[in-house]
Amino acid sequence: TATGPAAERGPARVQPVVTDDGIEATLEVAPQDPDRAGSVVALQTWGGKGAARLLTADPRRGAVLLERLGDAALTVLPPLDGCTVVTGLYPELHVPATAALPQLAPFVAARLDGVAGLGRDVPLPGRFARQALAAGRSLLADMPRTVVHGDLTYHTVVAGGRRPWLAVAPYGFAGDPCYEPAPLLWHRWGDYGSDLTAGILDRFWAIVDGTGWDERRVRDWVVVRSVAEVAATVARAGRRPLSARDLALVTRMIVTCKAMQGV
């Protein structure tokens, strides 16, 4: 039974509900997305550690019933504080993956195919495409099998009841934890102020210092994912010119790649 108004959270619609057993919960329904095929398995694997506890799911309808969550997302905190929260969740989320979880490698390989197919008319320096392809091939050849959320952002970490912050809406992959940080550098662009490079690097080092990860491996994943976002944007546009929104995203990815050259 619905107990309040529904809201949008990324591609999902979320509805506070109470079950027939009197349990307060959140119903989340999202469009079917083959890239999120591992979402339910990831939630089951975590068992509520670092992420919202899964009560039940109907994957064919894109529906999951989660423990009751708060209304606030991580966007209410300053960006660097948000990075600290996310790095605090990483150890609980990055656990050994089961065989049921889709592998990250084929997903990334398909994205790299898109990068390789970029034409010269795309407003992306060719050196970044070449860097992404070289780094991507190296990363694919050395891929761990750890549970990876795949879309950890300021919007997919929300206030919980039993915990201050919990992850939601995973893609769910078996892969490399160093794949995770890139979206934290892209999002909340307006908070960077006039010195974009310094702002990006501040978040980058906050994450690397908080995790102890190899900064070059994290850097390579940021470049790979940033260039892949450009390729995906171009692919969605098809034959039409890139819109102002598309060009703004491409610019954001280029600036992120430029910032990573200083690592």
Image (cartoon, rainbow, N blue to C red):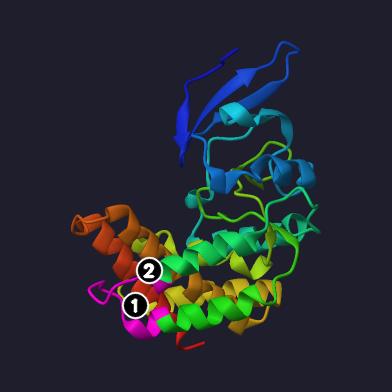
- Above or below, 170 against 79 in this view is above
Residue at 51% from the left image edge and 62% from the top image edge: 110
Q: In x, y percent, where is residue 22? A: 73, 14
In the displayed structure image, the side of residue 78 where residue 97 appears, left or right: right
- Rendering quarter of residue 162: top right
Question: Residue 127 lies in magenta, yes or no?
Answer: yes
The residue that disc 1 covers is 195
Residue at 54% from the left image edge and 81% from the top image edge: 135
Q: Which mark is residue 192?
A: 2
Query: What's the amino acid at mark 2?
Result: Tyr
Decide whether the magenta segment is chiefly helix, strand or loop.
loop
Q: In x, y percent, where is residue 252? A: 34, 68
Q: In x, y percent, where is residue 139? A: 62, 76
Q: Which mark is residue 92?
A: none
Residue at 60% from the left image edge and 12% from the top image edge: 1
Question: For the residue labelled by badge 1, is the local secondary structure a helix, a strand or a loop?
Answer: loop
Magenta residues span 116-129
Q: CA distance from mark 2 to mark 1?
A: 7 Å
> Is 186 or 201 nearer to us in this picture?
186
The answer to whether mark 2 and mark 1 are in CB contact below 8 A is yes
In the displayed structure image, the side of residue 197 where residue 140 appears, left or right: right
